[in-house]
């Protein structure tokens, strides 16, 4: 229809107009097909990604569970290489991990710390309490590294600092019962120099656990 000569021939113009009208439906269908094809490709990529994620989750779900996974956890962070900047990095890790724990609904209990002169730590130890705490934090252990320009760096040079994170399941309290019949108690006199009649009185005791020989 963009050809001006078509309009010089009324019969041809009418035929072209009729043909265009016939093609409108096909054109609309073609556009819908292109859109659906594009949506299909996007859905396929999204589905393939989700299938991969589900396969990974399924492998983890079928893997033998770690008996320690449900335990509380003890986390120890120590500054590594990098001086004061490493201590700041250790402090940043402490804040990140404790906030993450609280966000997951766990209870955080500080156990010990050795802060440096700034806002960092030479060492800090804390407990994370809650069902499944160890399963969440056990992969955080290891050396964590950061590369950045320290606030104290006047020339804008990038420094590398490290901090180590140790993650341990909290040990359960164990009640130990020792049968008195399993103990051998020897009382004897000490030997060697001494005062206050150390060599003439029963002043030394040795207890042996008979089943173990300890």
Image (cartoon, rainbow, N blue to C red):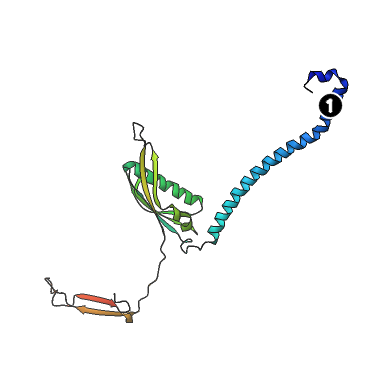
Residue at 31 percent of width and 43 percent of height: 83
Q: Position of residue 174 (x, y in %)?
A: 40, 69
Position of 31 with respect to 181 (left or right) is right
Residue furthest to the right in view is 11
Q: Nearer the viewer, residue 63 or 188?
A: 63
Image side of residue 211 versus residue 44, left or right: left
* Residue carrying label 1: 17
At numbered mark 1, what does the secondary structure look like: helix, strand or loop? helix
Please say if 158 is above or below 112. Answer: above
| Above or below for 168 versus 195 | above
Dot 1: within a 10 Å radius of its alpha carbon, few (fewer than 14), some, or many (20 or more) residues?
Answer: few
- Tell me if residue 109 can be seen: yes
Q: Is residue 37 left or right of residue 172?
A: right
Residue depicted at 65% across the width and 43% down the height: 41
- Residue 19, image x, y percentages: 83, 29
Which quadrant holds residue 196? bottom left
Q: How many marks?
A: 1
Quadrant in which the N terminus appears: top right
Q: Is residue 118 visible?
A: no
Position of residue 145 relative to residue 208, above or below, is above
Q: In what quadrant of the picture does the C terminus appear? A: bottom left
**x, y percentage for residue 51?**
60, 52
Query: Residue 213 appears at what percent x and percent y?
Result: 29, 77
> From what the image shows, is residue 128 above or below residue 146?
below
Give the residue displayed 71% in from the left and 41% down from the top: 36
Residue nearest the observer in this picture, 172 or 7? 7
- In front of the other: 90 or 203: 90
Residue at (85%, 28%) from the top-left corner?
18
């Amino acid at each position: 229809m963009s050809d001006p000569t078509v309009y010089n021939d009324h019969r041809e113009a009418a035929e072209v107009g009729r043909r265009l009208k016939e093609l409108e439906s096909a054109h609309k269908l073609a556009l819908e097909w292109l859109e659906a094809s594009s949506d299909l490709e996007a859905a396929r990529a999204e589905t393939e990604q989700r299938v991969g994620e589900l396969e990974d989750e399924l492998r983890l779900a079928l893997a033998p569970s770690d008996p320690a996974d449900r335990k509380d956890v003890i986390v120890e962070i120590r500054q590594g290489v990098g001086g004061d900047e490493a201590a700041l990095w250790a402090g940043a890790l402490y804040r990140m991990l404790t906030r993450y724990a609280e966000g997951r609904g766990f209870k955080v209990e500080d156990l010990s710390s050795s802060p440096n002169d700034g806002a960092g730590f030479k060492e800090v130890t804390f407990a994370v309490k809650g069902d499944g705490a160890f399963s969440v934090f056990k992969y955080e252990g290891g050396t964590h590294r950061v590369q950045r320009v320290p606030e104290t760096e006047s020339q804008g040079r990038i420094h590398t600092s490290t901090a180590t994170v140790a993650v341990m399941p909290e040990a359960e309290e164990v009640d130990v019962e020792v049968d008195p019949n399993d103990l051998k108690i020897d009382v004897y006199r000490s030997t060697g120099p001494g005062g206050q009649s150390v060599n003439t009185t029963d002043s030394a005791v040795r207890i042996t656990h008979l089943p173990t020989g300890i």
